[in-house]
Amino acid sequence: MQYGLSLPERLQKFNELFSNKQANSITKWDVPSVNGTDLYEVYHVSVELPKYRLDNTRTLALQEQYIFNKTLGEDFFNDVESDQVQEVQHNLLKALIKSSDKDKDLLSYFSDHTQTEPLILTHDGFVISGNRRLCAFRELLEEDYEKYKHFSQVRVVILPNLDPDKIDQIEDLLEQQKDIKEPFSWVSRALGYRRRMQRYNYSDVQLAKITGLKKTEISSLIEKLEIADRYLDSINKSKDYNQILDDFYAFEKIHSCKQKDKGGPTKKTAFEKLSFIAIKNKGSFSDRMYKNIPIIHEAQALIHNELSGEFEEELREIEAQAQTNQELNALNLIPDSTISVIKLLEKPEYEERIVDIVSDKIEEYLTLQREKKKKSSVLDRVRKANTLLIEANAIKSHETDKIGVSSQIQNIEKELGKIKDWINQK
């Protein structure tokens, strides 16, 4: 299998096509742009010609994962012309052309359908839109050339030479179109937004305007990715994004709890580390993490108190070491017990005991809330009844139907008598 012709070969082919557009083009196609749509010629080219675009947002998380798994340099995917890198990208895309939805499983879909939508290529032959489709065409040809030889020539649109940020914008607009596309994972979307802000020096306001999203949607998604990055660092799985693809709602709850927390940075850090331990050991908890994390936040004082008792000696050693370090650095800081708890939470040898404490305190907090609700349940209902009676008085008039009202008042007075007797009991 060939993963794209060389750059000179690609450019030569494009020049041949452009030399007589009228004769070589087979139709025209609208490509969305920031100003609406632009109409371009569609050409047939060999399926071997295009190269995968390595900046494709959909595969960013998979690339990071590959680099992590293979312990490669961060610049591995920078060599866009490399056959080796293109082959790796092809194999990453293979994982994305399968779906439990038959209409979105590309191998299944194109075994019964022909290509109708062209691949969108950059001026030098990299695929902006259609990377998964190109992968599927190549796989089907490899499987049975005679049966699928109609994919040996593919339809393409070749864009003019555009700035990289404009290419990213076109990718955004194309992704919004609904066909047989699978949505980007939340990690890939966040990685894509963060990369673009860093690469083009965009603010979140500028990127929001370009993508048509709300500024808060972009900034909060990136902040959740940063929380996820810290989590992966904490479990020594940096960039191993497969670990957290299904944990979006857990990181969303960590983010929202920290946003509303009026405490200082050490309290927020301690909460985050407790949440990380819970996510890592989610099998030890009875409920889903997105439900447990807000409870951990609310029960943080209970958890800290229990940790202080359970790890009294260990915390004393941590505080003594911290005091020694302060003296060596000629510092005279007011000790913060939460800092010692944070250092305790970072020690893996205590993790199992910490998980037991957090699990117990979640159950204790829920029990306290149930008891609290039970204690106030009578008052809550009497208050509601009072509100309804006030509303009844407010809306009564000479035209209001009075049938049945008297008997209901008798029932209310009877129930009020029972409540009064209960209140007066010694």
Image: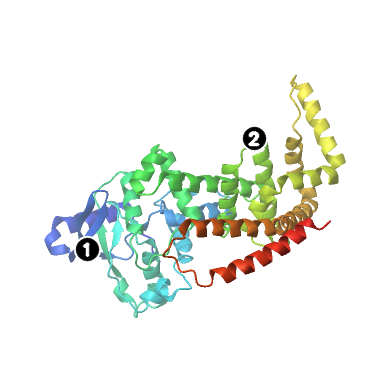
Residue at 82% x, 42% y: name it. Answer: 308
Residue at 29% x, 58% y: name it. Answer: 120
User: Disc 1 to disc 2, how far (Cα)?
Assistant: 61 Å
Q: How many marks?
A: 2
Residue at 43% x, 48% y: name it. Answer: 79
Say whether disc 1 or disc 2 marks the residue closer to the N-terminus.
Answer: 1
Identify the residue under disc 1. 43
Q: Which three-letter amino acid code belongs to the residue tagged 1?
A: Tyr
Identify the residue under disc 2. 264
Q: Horizontal placement of 395 versus 410: left or right?
A: left
Farthest front residue? 398
Residue 29 picture quarter: bottom left
Q: Quadrant of the C terminus?
A: bottom right
Does dot 2 land on a helix, a strand or a loop?
loop
Q: Residue 112: x, y in percent?
A: 35, 79
Which of the pair 249/119 is nearer the observer? 249
